[in-house]
Image: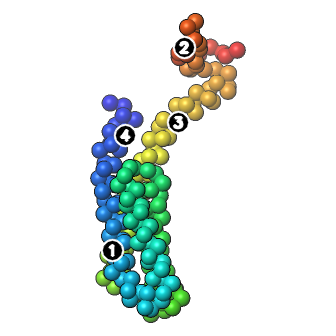
Amino acid sequence: MSHHEQSLVSAAATEPVARAVAIAGLAGVALIHLLDAHDTFIASPYKGWLYVGLIVGSMLTAGALLQRPDLRAWRAAIALSAGAFAAFVWSRTVGLPQGADDIGNWWEPLGLASLFVEAAVIAVGASVLQQAHRTRTAVVRPLTHLATSQESGYSSFRHERGSDGWAFGVRSSRKLK
């Protein structure tokens, strides 16, 4: 089995597991922020609305991943999780408006759970996107090689049209006309 075939088999085998992990992770992100939303709305309403956006976005993205493995949904999963992760770190270091009491509060249980789940979604999503990029690159690379060899005037594989009109490949190292 070629490397490309192994890559496709590996992608087909791991993709449902990765989707399940991401869906569960996004649901976890939504649940954690839902549990903290009431107190957050009371303390600073704008953060509460950011939570609502994160909850809705996480559930919509989980639904999209449940339907089919779309790269846009994977990118959204990473963006939502990375945004929540970054907001947590920002709120604990320099602080957010109306949130100075969170500075240095690294050990809050919901916050730690959120960081864990968000990091898992980011890691799985990045792995899936990297695998998709490698698979796409493996397919595009031979075509790129053909284009460059034809530009230089030599071809290792070119298309010719037969008498019946069908195109077929011809291996050659002769100079193109």
- Which label's residue is closer to the chain start, 2 or 3? 3
What amino acid does circle 1 point to? Leu
Which residue is drawn at the image coordinates 33% and 60% (left, top)?
23
- Which label's residue is closer to the chain start, 2 or 1? 1
Q: In the rendered view, does 141 fall on the left or right side of 61? A: right
Distance, label 1 to label 3, CA atoms, is 41 Å
Crowding at label 3, few (<14), some or many (≥20) Cα neighbours within 10 Å? few
Q: Secondary structure at mark 4?
A: helix
Q: Which mark is in front, 2 or 3?
A: 2
Res 153 → quadrant: top right
Q: Can residue 45 be seen?
A: yes
- Which label's residue is closer to the chain start, 1 or 3? 1
Distance, label 2 to label 1, CA atoms, is 58 Å
Q: Quadrant of the C terminus?
A: top right
Q: Which mark is in front, 4 or 2?
A: 2
Distance, label 2 to label 3, CA atoms, is 23 Å
What amino acid does circle 4 point to? Ser
Which residue lies under the disc numbered 4? 7
- Residue 172 location in percent, x, y? 57, 14
Q: In the rendered view, does 116 fall on the left or right side of 150? A: left
Residue 31 is tagged as 1
Which residue lies under the disc numbered 3? 140
Distance, label 4 to label 1, CA atoms, is 35 Å
Which residue is drawn at the image coordinates 48% and 92% (left, top)?
100
What amino acid does circle 2 point to? Trp
Q: Which mark is in front, 4 or 1?
A: 1
> Outermost residue, right direction?
177
- Residue 87 location in percent, x, y? 48, 77
Residue 166 is tagged as 2
Marks 2/1 in contact by CB < 8 Å: the verdict is no
